[in-house]
Image: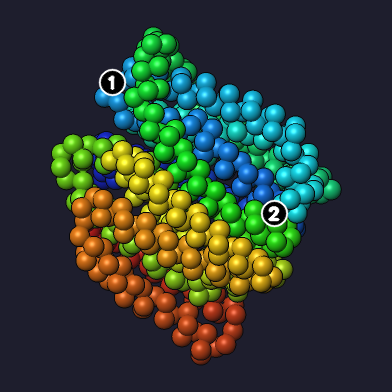
Amino acid sequence: MIDKLRAAMGSKLPAGSFARNVVTLMTGTTFAQALMILVAPILTRLYTPEDFGVFALYTSVLGILAVVSCWRYELAIVLPEKDEDAANLLVLSILICFSMAALTLLLVALFRTTLANLLGAPELAPWLWFMPLSLIAAGLFQVFNYWSTRRKQFKRLAVRQITQSTVISATQIGTGALYPTVNAGGLIGGAILGQLTATGRLAWQIGRDEGPKIRGAFNKLNMKQMLIRYKDFPLYSSWSGFLNTASAMLPALLLGYFFNPAVVGYYALGHRVLTMPMGVIGGSIAQVFVPQATEARRNANLDQLTLVLFQRLLAIGVVPIILITIVAPDLFALIFGYRWYVAGEYVRWLSVWILFNFISSPLSQMYLVLERQRDGLMVNAFMFAARLTALITGGILGDPLLTIALIGITSGALWLFNCTYILHMAEVPLGKSYLAILKYIIKAVPYASIPLLVLYVFSDSLSFVIAGIGSGIIFLLVQINQVKTRN
């Protein structure tokens, strides 16, 4: 089916174009994320909010470690003009990844119980033994991901996404149905198996297609030169990435510390449902944007490319986020079961954050393209401190919903600031940026009015949700028609 979709796109989009590369990645990512969304209502009936909370804590710890698993040298793989230099960066990143996994194993042996108790989830402790294995799978994927991006092998990455989501979904459902007493272990085990399977397959494909090229290019002296040439990545980008990821993972970790795994579970599901659909597009665009932006910088038209991308991301993201904000609690109760109504309330406060995170994530590659890692570090340090303050304030006050509101509002403002700063770096006039935001908010008003009008007339939760979904479908059809008109 995927090959048929790709063939259909091939007749519309030029080979090697930005749009075609994005859609190629989106083909696999869409399938992967759609599958995860489809199985979510099953998982929420097999696992409790507490189980989702423990799973979220595991993935949060992994996410923080994974971002520095290769000291960020994997980001530099796309930059050298010569493939030989990139191949040596690939080998260097792999060696660092295994070293970091060994260090993680030592830390787990010493502090796993202390960490689990600190996060308010003692049942997490035995699963932390698998953290080094997860780190290897996550770190190697990042390395192979950027190598494939450099080689413009986007089909390979799309297949990897499908493999991972399929294995995860099947394992989590099967474990939850057959072994209900394993609790959060079913979610964690499924994620580990899916990650290992998908990364293993990607490694096999690269070894089969490009293994001789990589082995032939490997040279210890050249690898040392690359270590020094791109030293700013571990010195600045690694800390920047660490703070950025830690900032994103902070809510789950501190909600576990101040409250309980159930609150973490509500937050995790709400955050997951918001970010998965946005990630389908945003992640694919970010993947393709790096080589395109690198070329645009050389051709002195980076500002044009950045502004167009910013406008497209606004056009895609504003309406869906506003609609989800309006119907979220009723939607969650209908799809996932009434005990997840609270997660929908959390979503309302998280939505602005997710919107500007969706827009900023692809644009944040500009720190890499312009080699301004120091600026990225300063921005991420400021964002980390502000979000930490918001979470601690809410935690001390002892109100979970207030804590979510504080982190949502603070994060939304911070990501808007990050967007603005990136556009400024790309020499895009700020007036154009803010006018674009206002323009797409105004365009969203008719779509938002539909479910609100239905709620006012019928005062019925089901009709309200259906109207919100219907408004979203109308928006999607309009966007498809506009794409066809442009082509």
Front-lying residue, 70 or 13: 70
The residue drawn where x is 34% and y is 57% is 419
Front-lying residue, 53 or 317: 53
Q: Quadrant of residue 273?
A: bottom right
The residue drawn where x is 42% and y is 39% is 237
Residue 304 position within the rendered picture, expressed as x and y whole percent measured from the top left: 19, 51
Residue 294 position within the rendered picture, expressed as x and y whole percent measured from the top left: 26, 37
The residue drawn where x is 42% and y is 65% is 413
The tag on residue 483 is none
Label 1 belongs to which residue?
Answer: 82
Q: Is residue 63 above or below residue 414?
A: above
Q: Quadrant of residue 296?
A: top left
The tag on residue 52 is 2
Q: Is residue 131 left or right of residue 152?
A: right
Closer to us: mark 2 or mark 1? 1
Front-lying residue, 240 or 215: 240
> What's the coloring here?
rainbow
User: Judging from the image, what secondary structure is the residue with disc 2 in?
Assistant: helix
Front-lying residue, 12 or 472: 472
Q: Is residue 94 above or below residue 326?
A: above
Q: The disc labelled 2 sits on which kind of residue?
A: Phe
User: Judging from the image, what secondary structure is the residue with disc 1 in?
Assistant: loop
Which callout, 2 or 1, points at the residue further toward the start of the chain?
Answer: 2
Q: Is residue 431 left or right of residue 355?
A: left
